[in-house]
Image (cartoon, rainbow, N blue to C red):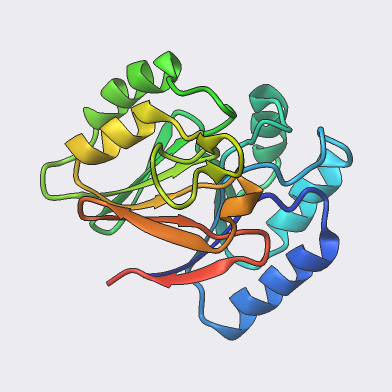
Amino acid sequence: MKILAFTDLHNDISALENIKEQIKNNDIELAVCTGDFTFFEHHVEIMIKKIAELGTDVLLVHGNHEYDEVVEALCKQHKNIHFMHNNTKKFGKYVFIGHGGGGFSLRDPDFVENSKRLMKNVEKNEKIILMTHAPPHNTKVDVVPGYGHVGNKDYRDFIEKNNVVLALCGHIHEGFNKHDKIGNAFVINPGYNGKIIDIK
């Protein structure tokens, strides 16, 4: 499965057009957006509409610049956008688990509670792709100069305890285009230019 992940567009239409071209030219099966596609929800309706025009199914979570209720309602207007906050979606032997919002909190009780519920729908042989806005703790993608590692420890705990093969995130601009590993899971912040990932 070939996916294109992107994050933190912050209303950059030209970056979104670039992503659309990548999808068109690389046989992308699925796009994944990990939030902050607006700047404090400015033109949120326009951005969702543009994302719906990417030419493929899109799995999306909101960022700290969007409200989950607003994004969920707008996503329902487009058949190819799947709002993934506290939801799962299966593609073959892979299960996507999404959690949006957040920011610099080291712990997220809402994620802990909902992930336990969501894991009841995951079979033992299925591989998990975790998509969050904030990054997991103590990786190359959660470092802010002067502050150190600011990622979420509950995300990292979840990755370490479950069959996660890929963790996609955003939020930390200094982490754009960086990647790391937690156990067997690749951790990637694809940035606003997007990253093509071929999942074998």
132 with respect to 137 (left or right): right
Give the quadrant of residue 67: top right
Q: Along the line of sight, which residue is nearer the eye, 137 or 9?
A: 137
Question: Could you tell whether 123 is left or right of 20 in the image?
Answer: left
Q: Position of residue 188 (x, y in %)?
A: 45, 57
What is the x, y in percent for residue 148? 51, 38
| Residue 8 percent across, percent down from the top left | 68, 49
13 relative position to 23: left or right = right
Is residue 80 visible in the rendered image? The answer is no
Res 16 visible: yes
At x 69%, y 42%, the residue is 36
Q: Residue furthest front?
A: 146
- Image point (21%, 55%), residue name: 184
With respect to residue 177, does 72 lie above or below? above
Image location of residue 145, percent across then percent down: 60, 44
Q: Quadrant of the N terminus?
A: bottom left
